[in-house]
Image: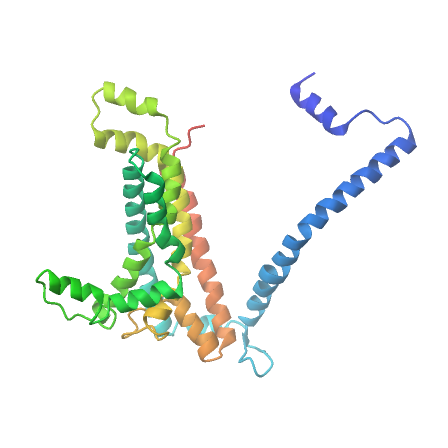
């Protein structure tokens, strides 16, 4: 008998011969199923009430003109066609794409560099790991965004530090359109702790014998990093890449707090999510905002699908 057959027989239990035995077994299985469904109930209620329900309502509202006072009026695809002529929406997409394409790679590179450094077995590793992880826990909070705004103000800590080392600076890093988006990208890069911890866990899983064999063959540190670390870590890089891209597209708090909810100066920090918020909760154009939300979902889905498609060319799975 094969192992699978033995497991199947164990799962089924002893063979039931009489009708009463089969009925008792069915009754017992029914009690087990009820207990399982009971434990699943909170998750199912949350999924339906908090996720699926609002998504379906949002999908319906995206085809309507709804101002939260009057009943929704069906307008078909008008909200979606209107986006094609909305210059501010197109600008918000450009700002968001810059934020994602610049912020995510810089954040992942910094996270990987710090993880490689911490993987060298330095003293007080837990302390440094906690210190580096802390910004990830606080980075998306309102308090940190307010602190960031104060630090990069005209009289903020950054200009004071530059003046202290002899570089005269009166730049309003937040109020100048040339630098405002850069400061928010810097805030995003600063929250590298979460991907760093995942990279660090991945580095610990790479067998040491690969590095020892490469060292015997005379490979340099760079060659060991490029030929061993990166390929072995590619599934972790892919995982972090997908998560960070999705998170970056959804960024809202930093731009809202730093710009005071306006997306300024001169719309330089007008993220797509912030413009969606302004349309929905500032101008009460809930139908248009719902359509924007579905466009954002489609954009994120496309990028995620591209990442999964491209992963077969660069992600190495050690099966």
Q: Nearer the viewer, residue 132 or 312?
A: 132
Query: Residue lying farthest left?
Result: 166
- In this picture, residue 18 sits left or right of residue 89: right
Query: Residue lying farthest top?
Result: 1
> Which image quarter: residue 24?
top right
Q: Residue at x 36, y 34 (%)?
A: 203
Q: Position of residue 62 (x, y in %)?
A: 53, 70
Q: Nearer the viewer, residue 147 or 257?
A: 147
Q: Residue at x 51, y 75 (%)?
A: 286
| Count of numbered circles in the view | 0
Q: Quadrant of the N terminus?
A: top right
Q: Position of residue 174 (x, y in %)?
A: 25, 69
Q: Quadrant of the C terminus?
A: top left
Residue 270 seen in the current view = no
Question: From the viewer's perspective, is residue 233 above or below residue 181?
Answer: above
Q: Residue at x 46, y 54 (%)?
A: 301
Query: Residue lying farthest bottom?
Result: 70
Q: Position of residue 67 (x, y in %)?
A: 53, 80
Question: From the viewer's perspective, is residue 240 above or below residue 162?
Answer: above
Q: Nearer the viewer, residue 142 or 22?
A: 142
Question: From the viewer's perspective, is residue 93 above or below residue 283?
Answer: above
Residue 129 seen in the current view = yes
Which scheme is used to colour this image of the protein?
rainbow
> Which image quarter: residue 22?
top right
Q: Position of residue 33 (x, y in %)?
A: 75, 43
Q: Residue at x 39, y 40 (%)?
A: 236
- In this picture, residue 58 sits left or right of residue 235: right
- In this picture, residue 15 sits left or right of residue 216: right
């Amino acid at each position: 008998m094969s192992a699978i057959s033995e497991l199947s027989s164990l799962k089924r239990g002893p063979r039931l011969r009489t009708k009463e035995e089969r009925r008792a077994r069915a009754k017992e299985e029914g009690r087990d199923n009820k207990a399982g469904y009971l434990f699943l109930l909170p998750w199912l209620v949350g999924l339906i009430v908090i996720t699926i329900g609002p998504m379906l309502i949002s999908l319906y509202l995206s085809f309507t003109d709804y101002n939260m006072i009057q009943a929704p009026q069906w307008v078909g695809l008008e909200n979606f066609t209107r986006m094609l002529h909305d210059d501010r929406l197109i600008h918000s997409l450009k700002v968001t794409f810059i934020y994602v394409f610049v912020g995510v790679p810089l954040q992942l590179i910094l996270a990987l560099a710090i993880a490689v450094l911490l993987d060298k077995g330095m003293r007080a590793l837990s302390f440094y790991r906690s210190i580096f992880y802390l910004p990830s826990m606080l980075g998306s909070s309102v308090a940190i965004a307010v602190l960031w705004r104060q630090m990069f103000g005209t009289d903020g800590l950054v200009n004071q530090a530059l003046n202290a080392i002899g570089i005269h600076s009166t730049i309003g890093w937040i109020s100048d359109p040339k630098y405002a988006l850069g400061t928010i990208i810097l805030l995003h890069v600063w929250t590298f702790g979460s991907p760093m911890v995942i990279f660090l866990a991945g580095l610990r899983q790479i067998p040491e014998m690969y590095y020892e064999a490469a060292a015997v063959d005379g490979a340099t540190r760079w060659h060991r990093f490029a030929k061993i670390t990166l390929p072995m870590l590619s599934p972790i890089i892919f995982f972090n890449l997908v998560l960070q891209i999705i998170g970056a597209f959804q960024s809202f708090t930093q731009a809202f707090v730093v710009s005071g909810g306006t997306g300024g100066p001169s719309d330089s920090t007008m993220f797509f999510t912030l413009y969606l918020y302004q349309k929905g909760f500032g101008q009460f154009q809930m139908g248009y905002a719902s359509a924007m939300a579905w466009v954002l979902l489609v954009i994120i889905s496309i990028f995620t699908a591209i990442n999964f498609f491209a992963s077969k060319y660069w992600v190495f799975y050690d099966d």
